[in-house]
Amino acid sequence: MALSTPVSASFDPFDSYPTTRLPRVHVQRLIQHFLSNISFQYYPLDLNMTSNPFVVSWWPLALADPALFHVSIQTASLDEERRAQRGFPVSELLMADSVSLIRSKIGSGLLAIQDETLNSVVTLAAIEHGKRNISASKAHIDGAKRIVGIRGGLDQVKQASPLTARMIAWVSLLVTGSPQYPTQNEDGTGDGVSPTLQWLLSSSFLETQDPVVQALDLQPEIADVFARLRGILHQTNASSLLGTELHDLTCFVVHKLLLMPSYATSPHSECLRCAMALYMLIIHGTTYYTHTELANSLVQLLKGHLQPLAGKTWSIPFSSLQIWVLSVAIASTTDPTEIQWLNYAARIASNALGLETWHHVVIHLKNILWLETERADIFRQQWTGILT
């Protein structure tokens, strides 16, 4: 991964970091790895050393907080040891010390509710989830929720530290598979994951009738999200959404969609609910933690409602919806069995609609929801295989 600005060897010239049980040279190597690699794995939306939030916001806090420092270099150690495939002795030592330091903070009044404590706890949740220690991960998420509650809610945390609030909401969703925080109201009031400026302004797209939205006869809540996203993503400058803007939009939309009930009586609305969440994950990419598990579970849910769409190919909007939903599901799943099943369904649908080239397919995709980004190539590659 190429960075806009390389890490300087003298980034911390005074070695002013908390004490650990590791040799000095080892600690310095882990620091270097965190700053040059892990920070950009966690937040690939900004590859500039002078603006990446894990470098400019997180790291100064870690240098002054032993618990957060241990957790941070533990992520670097895990990455090193995973690559070496010789076990995780250093990471386990750092984990034990991290937990001990966090417990001390939790028992120390105001220290328990610091941003540093929240950052440490939610990172441990991701680490434990990655090691398949699901109960430990859930315990950390529950602990973070209690701290957020004491602080007055997610919005209050965001006022003090946008990075902390973003990470808490997103990682909590990914490791549990469901939203752990509500969303704010459409006007940005209340507590929870907040709408972006683009979302607030998108209410104007509801004032005019969108013929595609109307033709699909969707549940009102789904139609509202669909119309807003079409308005936001189909603007000429949509592909220039900044990293944090795209993340915040994705976080809000995915939370909003997954907090809705399942629409069993409207299969196409349910398909679109799942597929819109998946599409936002695709264009957003991996940030803070992998979303693979969440995506696979959404594909499973979506599959159960696909069949009714196959019988509506007489309608152009429904034909486009079928192709779009299948495309999103194929691009999202990592399960070979699911890929095979979905490719077969896509082949049948494309034959029924007379689709022979990628150009034919992309017309349908653009009829529904489409953002021209680098990740759009995923769809083209998938369909090249299906159509040959």
Image (cartoon, grey):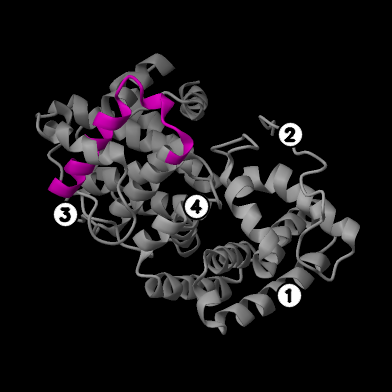
Camera-side mark, 3 or 4: 4
Residue identifier under label 4:
163
287 or 104: which is nearer to us?
104
Query: What crowding class fits label 4: few (fewer than 14 Cα within 10 Å), some (14-19), or many (20 or more)?
Result: some
268 or 257: which is nearer to us?
257
Q: Which residues are magenta?
A: 219-244
**Alpha carbon separation for disc pair 2 and 3:** 54 Å
Quarter assignment of residue 185: bottom left
| Mark before the other along the chain sequence, 1 or 4 | 1
Q: Is disc 4 placed on a helix, strand or loop?
A: helix
Q: Main secondary structure of the magenta part?
A: helix
**Alpha carbon separation for disc pair 3 and 1:** 52 Å
Residue identifier under label 2:
6
Q: Which mark is residue 265?
A: 3
| Mark before the other along the chain sequence, 3 or 4 | 4
Residue identifier under label 1:
97
The percent position of residue 308, horizontal first and vertical second, equals: 23, 43
Camera-side mark, 3 or 1: 1
